Image (spheres, grey):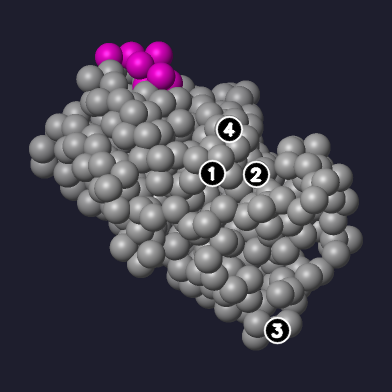
Amino acid sequence: MKLSLLFLVLGYLLSQFYRSFLAVLAGFLQVDIGVGADDLALASGLWFLTFALMQLPVGWALDTYGPRRTAALLLGLGGTGGAVILAVAQNALHIHLAMTLLGIGCAPVLMASYYIFARSFPPLLFATLAGAVIGFGSLGNILGALPMAWAAESFGWRGSILVIAGVTALVSVLIWLVVQDPPQAEAPDGAKGGLRDLLKIRALWLLLPLLAVNYAPAAGLRGLWAGPFYTDLYDASATVIGQVTLVMALAMIAGNFAYGPLDRVFGTRKGVVLAGNLCGALCLAALALFPLSGIWATGVLLAGVGFFGASFPMMMAHGRSFIPAHLTGRGVTLLNLFSIGGVGVIQMASGAIHAKAQPLPPEAAYQTLFLFFGGLLLLGCVIYAFAQDRTD
C-alpha cells in the first residue's frame, strides 16, 4: 500500500507541475510563438476546467474499476500526449489543446489517493493524510518554478518539456504495475449510488461555494499571474520570477502540512478553514493596496496567499465526513469538481478582467485582479460561515 501511494504521489507531483509551469514559460512562449498572457490565462483555465469536468467520470471509474487502472490509463494517455503536443506547439491553439489533454491526464491521480485513504485508513486521519499527499506532491509546484526556469534557459523549453513527457509515461507505467486497489464498499440494501444522491446531502451545499473559490487565488497567481505581474511591474527576469514563485510554492507546501492536523488540535474543521481563508483574503487586500511595494514585499504577500490558501485537504475532510462509504469515489470527485472547476472558471475570467483593464496603468490592472480574487474568497467565507461543522 505504501508503494502504491508513493507512485500516486509522483503522479500528483506531475499534476502540480503541469498546473503551475506556465508562469515561468510566459516569456519564452511570447517570444517563440507569440502567445500572450491572456492566451495563457485561457490555456491555464482550460487545464482546470477539463480537470474538473473529468471528476464525474473519474469518480464513477474509481468506484467501478478502482484507482490503479483509472490513474494509469488517463495519466499515460492524456498526460504524456499533452506534454508532447506542448513541446512541439507552434501557436496558441496547440497550447490550448495540450493543456486540455494534460487536464484529462492529471484528473485522477489525487482522487485515487483519496479513494485509498477513505477505504483503507481511519476517518480521523483523512485530513492529515490528504494534506501530506498534497504537501509532498507540491514538489511539482517547486519544479515548475526556479528549476523549470533554469532548464528552459539552459536547454530550451521544448526539450525540457519532452523530458517531462518521458517521466510522465514512466510514472503511468509504474502506477499500472504497482498500485493495489482497496476492497470496494458494498452499498446498503436499497441504497442508490448516483450523483443525485450526493446532491441530496444538504450539509454539502454550504461547503461547495468556498470550495469553488478557496484554491483559485493561489492557483491563479502561482500558476500564471505571478509571471506577468513581475514582468510588467518590475521588468523581472525568468530567474527572479522563478525565485519568487519558488517561495510561494514552498509556502503552499508548508500550508498543506500545517492545516492537516489542526482539526484534531482545535476540535473543529470549519473554524480552521474559515480563519485560514480570511487571512488569505487579507493578503490579497494588501497586494491590491501596495502592488509596487517591492519584489520581495509582494513576494511575502503572495506566499501568504499560498500558505493560507492550502485549506483544500481540510475542506475535503469536512465534506467527506458527510458522504456514505459506497459513494466515496463519486463523493470526493464531486468536491474536487467544484474546487478545480472554480479555479478554471475564475482563471479564464481573470484573463478577461486583465485584458479589459489594459488601458489602465499596469499596477492598476493587477490591483483589479487582486481585488477580484479577494472579493470572491471573502464571499465564499461568508457563505461557509453558516455550514455545519463536523469532525471524525
Asked if labels 1 and 2 touch by Cβ distance under 8 angstroms, the answer is: yes
Q: Residue furthest front?
A: 189
For the question of whether residue 95 can be seen, the reply is: yes
Q: Tell me if mark 1 has few (under 14), some (14-19) or many (20+) residues whose alpha carbon lies within 10 angstroms of its own.
A: many
Q: CA distance from mark 3 to mark 1?
A: 33 Å
Foreground: disc 3 or disc 1: 1
Task: Label the magenta part by its dominant secondary structure.
Answer: helix
* Residue ID for mark 4: 57
- Viewer-proximal residue among 324 and 7: 324
Question: Disc 2 marks which residue?
Answer: 330
Q: Nearer the viewer, mark 1 or mark 4?
A: 1
Q: Is residue 211 magenta?
A: no
* Amino acid found under the numbered disc labelled 2: Arg
Lower position in the chain sequence, tag 4 or tag 3: 4
Tag 1: amino acid: Leu
Which residue bears the numbered disc 1?
A: 62
Which residue is the site of mark 3? 266
